[in-house]
Amino acid sequence: MTTQSMDIYALMQTGKPYKTFKKTILGKVYVTVLNTFSDQPEGKILQGRANTPDSLVDVWSEKEYLFFRRMNKRHLELGTLIEYERPEVVEEAKKIEQASDDELKAVIKQRFMALKNVVEKTESIPFLYRLLELARELEASEKIIAKIETRISELQGT
C-alpha cells in the first residue's frame, strides 16, 4: 500500500472526504467515480432525499476529484450535482451517568465538595444507587454516604 493510499484510508476512517457532491433533483443521478483502491472507473447511482447517504458521493483525493469533475461535467454544468459541505459533527461530552466504575471510584475519592457537586447535579436515581454501592465498597466516610442517600431521598420525594 502506498503512502497516498494510506493517507486516503486514514481520511476514510475519520469520515472527512476531500470533497462531497450531492444531487439536486428528485430523481436518480448516475455518476462515474474513480475507485479509491483499484484506480478503475465505476458507476454509482445517487438516489433518495437530499443529504441522505444515498444522495451524496465522496471523493477522497485530488486525483479522484479531478476525475469526477471531468467525467460528470454535464451534471455539474446543469446543476444536477453540486459541491456539498458536510456539517461538522460535534461529539457530546460524556455524561457522568456513562462513567465506568473506575471513573466513579475516582470521583468518590475526590474532595467532598467535588463529590457533592456531582451528586447534586444528578437526576438519575439508578446512577445514585450505583454511586452509593461503590462508596460503600470503597468504605467511604459516613458524610459521603449520607450525602448520596439524602439526594436519593430528595429525588424520590420522601
Image (cartoon, rainbow, N blue to C red):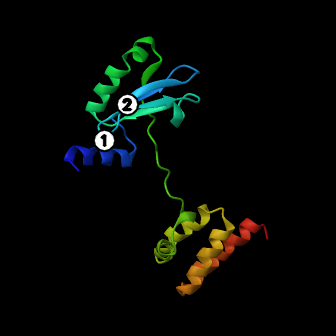
**Looking at the image, can residue 84 be seen?**
no
Q: Are marks 1 and 2 in contact (CB under 8 Å)?
A: no
In the rendered view, tell whether residue 105 sits above or below residue 65.
below
**Looking at the image, can residue 88 be seen?**
yes
In the rendered view, tell whether residue 140 sits above or below residue 14.
below
Can you tell which of label 1 and label 2 is closer to the viewer?
A: 1
Whole-percent x, y for residue 104 in the image: 51, 73
How would you rate the neighbour count of disc 2 (Cα within 10 Å): few for under 14, some for 14-19, many for 20 or more?
Answer: many
Residue located beneath label 1 in the image = 38
Residue at position x 52%, y 34% in the image: 54
Q: Quadrant of the C terminus?
A: bottom right
Under tag 2, what secondary structure?
strand
Q: Nearer the viewer, residue 59 or 127?
A: 59
Whole-percent x, y for residue 123 in the image: 66, 62
Whole-percent x, y for residue 140 in the image: 54, 84
Residue at position x 56%, y 86% in the image: 137
In the rendered view, tell whether residue 14 sits above or below residue 136.
above
Residue located beneath label 2 in the image = 33
Q: Amino acid at mark 2?
A: Val
The answer to which quarter of the image holds residue 17 is top left
On screen, residue 19 versus residue 102, left or right, reads left
Q: Nearer the viewer, residue 9 or 144?
A: 9
On screen, residue 143 versus residue 41, left or right, reads right
How would you rate the neighbour count of disc 1 (Cα within 10 Å): few for under 14, some for 14-19, many for 20 or more?
Answer: few
Whole-percent x, y for residue 18 in the image: 33, 34
Q: Earlier in the sequence, mark 1 or mark 2?
A: 2
The answer to which quarter of the image holds residue 60 is top left
Residue at position x 43%, y 26% in the image: 31
Under tag 1, what secondary structure?
loop
Residue at position x 59%, y 75% in the image: 131
**How far apart are the alpha carbons under marks 1 and 2?**
11 Å
